[in-house]
Image (cartoon, rainbow, N blue to C red):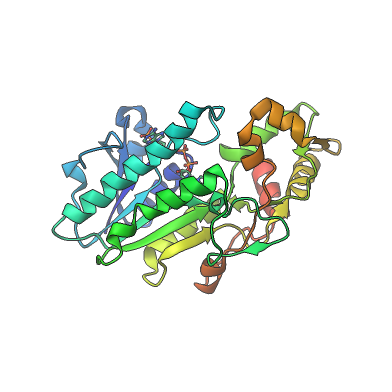
């Protein structure tokens, strides 16, 4: 069976391509810069150029035994959230997704599934609340991005293509994402966490992340939003303490929210100070077996390798 992946060259995309290719799928990775990723080509993954906005490449022809996974979008943590950057974050996602949905609408044989990235950012700031897939959206910038992003799949509601939105929580790995950004401060004895530290972080280990996407792909009953988070969320202080202990460093210091807001603006509020206690109800009900359900073992595994 063929899997076409947009945004395949990124932090989640690369290990996902390898997992699917090693599991016997034919993987076509769409990229704006296919020549920059010879490492994927080495793993029998076919790289095809797609500019992320318009005409679908014919090499990625859709058929009934194809599934599409869409992870494409401007990275949300790579630049400060100026007005221009916020437009880029939203539009890169909407354009890629709309182009994919149109390609599916135009195809004679509809692909079996479209799995698109979304984020736990959908739920906004929810202190004192546990949320699963049945909770409504929040009212932050990221919630509005996720709502619009997920809505781009609505035109396929009555089509034979099953649609799912993988609402990823912060994905932990030593090679990218949130943890990689945190590690240098701990390394140089300035481990810290955003005060008050009690805010929930609905993390997930990268290895479980890609296995969960494979489960969504292979489980026809899974559609609509699916939270891709560990079953035991932690809080920001616990996360920082575990990193300190694993790196044999002193206890981390709290950084006041106003300092973070001064330095990072709105990004700090939505990425560091936000409280999201998200539960992966659908994955759990589908029988997904997390290799890392608890944060201590996940951090031990990742820091041991860093
Ligand atoms: P990355 O930023 O690592 O990769 C995203 C990919 O999208 C890139 O490899 C790039 O592919 C493509 N891309 C980047 N900018 C643009 C653009 N302006 N227009 C079109 N395509 C673009 O993302 P992740 O792998 O970390 O995440 C995948 C998806 O999951 C993202 O949409 C992200 O928002 C979401 N997510 C991730 C989380 C995480 O912790 N990592 C948490 C929650 C949600 P190329 O350059 O080859 O075209």
The residue at the point 23 percent across, 54 percent down is 104
Q: Residue furthest left?
A: 108
Of all residues shown, which one is farthest toward the right?
Answer: 250
Q: Is residue 137 above or below residue 80?
A: below
Q: Quadrant of residue 267?
A: top right
Count of picture labels:
0
Q: Could you tell me if residue 9 is visible in this image?
A: no
* Image location (x, y in percent) of residue 108: 13, 58
Horizontal side of residue 55 vs 156, given as left or right: left
Work out whether residue 37 can be spotted.
Answer: yes
Residue nearest the observer in this picture, 257 or 216 = 257
Residue in view at x 39 percent, y 41 percent: 93
Taking 140 as reference, is 238 left or right? right
Q: Quadrant of ligand 1?
A: top left
Left or right, 215 with reference to 43: right
Check the image and name the residue furthest to the front.
Answer: 139
Question: Quadrant location of the N terminus?
Answer: bottom left
Residue placed at 21% from the left, 42% from the top? 56
- Position of the C terminus by quadrant: top right
Q: Nearer the viewer, residue 98 or 35?
A: 98
- Above or below, comparing residue 225 to residue 273 in the picture: below
Percent position (x, y) of residue 228?
53, 57
The x and y percentages for residue 170 are 59, 47
x, y percent for residue 49: 26, 34
């Amino acid at each position: 069976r063929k899997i076409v992946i947009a945004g395949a060259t990124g932090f989640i995309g690369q290990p996902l391509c390898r997992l699917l290719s090693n599991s016997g799928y034919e993987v076509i990775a769409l990229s704006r810069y296919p020549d920059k990723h010879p490492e994927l080509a080495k793993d029998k993954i076919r790289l095809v150029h797609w500019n992320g906005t318009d005409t679908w490449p014919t090499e990625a022809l859709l058929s009934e035994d194809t599934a599409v996974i869409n992870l494409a979008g401007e990275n949300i943590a790579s630049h400060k959230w100026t007005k221009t950057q916020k437009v880029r974050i939203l539009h890169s996602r909407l354009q890629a997704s709309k182009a994919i949905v149109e390609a599916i609408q135009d195809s004679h044989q509809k692909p079996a599934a479209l799995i698109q990235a979304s984020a736990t950012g959908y739920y906004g700031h929810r202190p004192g609340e546990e949320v699963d897939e049945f909770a409504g959206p929040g009212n932050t910038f990221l919630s509005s991005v996720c709502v619009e992003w997920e809505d781009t799949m609505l035109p396929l509601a009555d089509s034979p293509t099953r649609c799912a939105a993988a609402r990823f929580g912060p994905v932990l790995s030593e090679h990218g994402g949130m943890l990689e950004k945190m590690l240098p401060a701990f390394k140089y004895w300035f481990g810290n966490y955003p005060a008050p530290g009690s805010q929930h972080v609905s993390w997930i280990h990268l290895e479980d992340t890609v296995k969960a996407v494979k489960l969504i792909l292979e489980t026809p009953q899974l559609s609509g939003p699916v939270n891709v988070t560990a079953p035991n969320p932690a809080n920001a202080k616990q996360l920082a303490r575990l990193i300190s202990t694993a790196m044999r460093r002193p206890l981390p210091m709290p950084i006041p929210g106003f300092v973070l807001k001064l330095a990072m603006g709105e990004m700090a509020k939505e990425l560091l100070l936000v409280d999201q206690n998200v539960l992966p109800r659908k994955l759990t009900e589908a029988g997904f077996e997390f290799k890392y359900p608890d944060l201590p073992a996940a951090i031990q595994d990742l820091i041991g390798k860093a």
